[in-house]
Each structure stands twice: as C-alpha cells, then as structure tokens.
Image: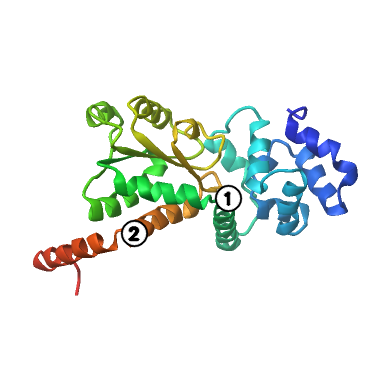
Amino acid sequence: MLESDVYQRIVKNRERMSKSHKKIAGYLIENHETAPFLTASKLAKNVKVGEATVIRFAFFLNYKGYPDLQRHLQEALQRKMTSAEVLVRTTDENERTEHVVSEILSDDIQNLKMTLSQMEPDVFEKAVTAIVEAKRIYIIAYRSAASIGVFLEFYLDLVLQNTEMIRQADGVSEHLLDISEQDLVIGLGFSRYTKRTVEVLKFVKQQRAKTLVITDHLMSPLVPYGDLNIIASTEINSFIDSFSAPMSIASALITALTRSQHKQVEQRLHELEGLWNKFDVFYD
C-alpha cells in the first residue's frame, strides 16, 4: 500500500516540505489505515496545524484539493471500509460530544467551499437545459441518497409535472421499459455506491437516454455513465456522508430551472395556490 503513487509523492517531496508539511506527511504515513478517513479539519487537529495548512499540503503534492488527496489515500487501502470500520476509525472515545456540532458544521462548510471551487459553470448550465428539455425525468437514488432524490422529485414534478423517482429497485424494468433519448435520468450515488444505481445508469445509457450524475468523486463508478457529471464533496468525520453540498446542488438546479422558465412556473404556482387554498393544505 505504501508503494502506491500517493505515498511515493509524499516520500519523493519530503525534503522540499516545510516543517508543518513534514508533520502532516509523517502523520499520514504512520497512520495510513486511519488517516484517509479524516476530514481536513480533523487531520489538522490531530497533527496540530491549521486546516489551511492541510489544504495547502494537498496542492503541494499536485492534487486538486484535500478531497482529491483523501480519495487517493483511501484508494491506496485497496478496499472500501465497512460502515462499522469507518465508525471505529473516526471516533475518539475521549472527545466531548458538545464539540461535535462545531466540528461537523465546519466540515460541511469546507464541503460546500470545495464543491463550489470544483463546479464547472458550463456543466451546470447544460444540466439545467437538459432538465428543461426532457420529455420525462427519472430519478435513480437508493439508500441514503434517496433523501436528495425525494427533494428533487417533489420540486421538479411540482413545476414540470414529468418527474418520477423510481423507489422500488425491483420495479426499475417496468418503469424504464420505453425510455428514450428524449428522456433524462438523474442518478445520485455516493460512497459506498449501490450496484443497482450503476446497473440502471448503464442500462439507460444503452437506451440512449440522457444522463445527469451527481456524485462525490470523479472516480465514482457512476461517472462513466453520466453525460453530465456534477461532483459534490460529502466527507465528514463520521461513518455517514454529509449531504449539505449535494442538497445545495439540488436546490441550485431547481432554482436555476424556475428562473429560466419563470413565466411558466409563475403561472403554474398561481394555479397551484388556488388548489392549495381550496383543499386547505397549509396551516393559517
């Protein structure tokens, strides 16, 4: 494992490193089984350097940022950790629980910043256009990723009336039987990726449907099947994924869609308001 490219880069560049960078390098090598699962803020805390120093260390090694370095460190382990293993490796039994909220929110802020920095505006614009032009929209999102899928489905179908999230894995074939190149499939998946998500995206690509993938790494198994790929950072110091950045991407897509089609959406919302009042939907 320590012979992998990421560790070779660390060793090769060690003499050129600052004192702080050497401390980070030493920690990564000595803790190669646990360090890949630490967020930038947690690694900085353990090494006793600033979080900005950790981020600069990643750039020093010619990675695109800390999430890129972290991904290579994780890949060097050659297998995905189970949820239980990640929990053990990211839990400090002596750490006070009242510090968790500031730690996790700080990690989320970093995820949002990283996602924004790697966002390609032209890809985002093409994604909005694909949503607007699609005859039908299907959302593929299983397990925890379904939370984002439900949010997207609710608002896209509210204004477009053509969106469906396929909830039952066994019902995929019936729902996608007549899918065509006029349709759009939005696939959401984050490490650890479900096989069914990959299989469905592979199938719809064979049917020439357009695909939009929202995932956490360019090395995600979903990426090869995306006509458009949006990368959202999800790393926090826990066995769960942070969905702050993917949910913000979903919010941005919905908002951009409604602004680009504001006349149609405004008319639709006026009609809906009348129905909501008639059926007494909201609490006064």
Residue 149 in sight in this render: no
Identity of the residue drawn at 49% across and 31% down: 224
Give coordinates of residue 228: x percent, y percent.
45, 40
Q: Residue 5's image quarter?
A: top right
Of pointers 2 and 1, the one earlier in the residue sequence:
1
The C terminus: image quadrant: bottom left
Q: Is residue 200 left or right of residue 110?
A: left
Gap in angstroms between the C-alphas marked 2 and 1: 23 Å
Specify few, some or many for label 2: CA neighbours under 10 Å numbering under 14, 14-19, or 20 or more. Answer: few
Q: Quadrant of residue 72?
A: top right
Residue at position x 39%, y 54% in the image: 253
Residue type beneath disc 2: Ser
Q: Are marks 2 and 1 in contact (CB under 8 Å)?
A: no
Q: The residue tagged with tag 1: helix, strand or loop?
A: loop
Q: How is the image coloured?
A: rainbow
x, y percentage for residue 161? 21, 49
- In the image, what residue occupies the spot 85% across and 40% down? 13
**Residue type, mark 1 in image:** Gln
Q: How many marks?
A: 2
Q: Is residue 255 above or below residue 243?
A: below
* Quadrant assignment, res 182: top left
Q: Quadrant of the N terminus?
A: top right
**Is residue 32 something that shows in the picture?**
yes
Which residue occupies the foreground of this view, 86 or 4?
A: 4
Looking at the picture, tell me which residue is in the foreground, 101 or 136: 136
Q: Position of residue 241 (x, y in %)?
A: 51, 46
Counting from the top left corner in percent of width and height, residue 7 is at 77, 34
What residue is shown with label 2? 260
Tell me the residue that label 1 is attached to.
118
| Left or right, residue 282 beside residue 88 | left
Element assignment for label 2: helix
Question: Is residue 72 found left or right of 124 in the rendered image?
Answer: right
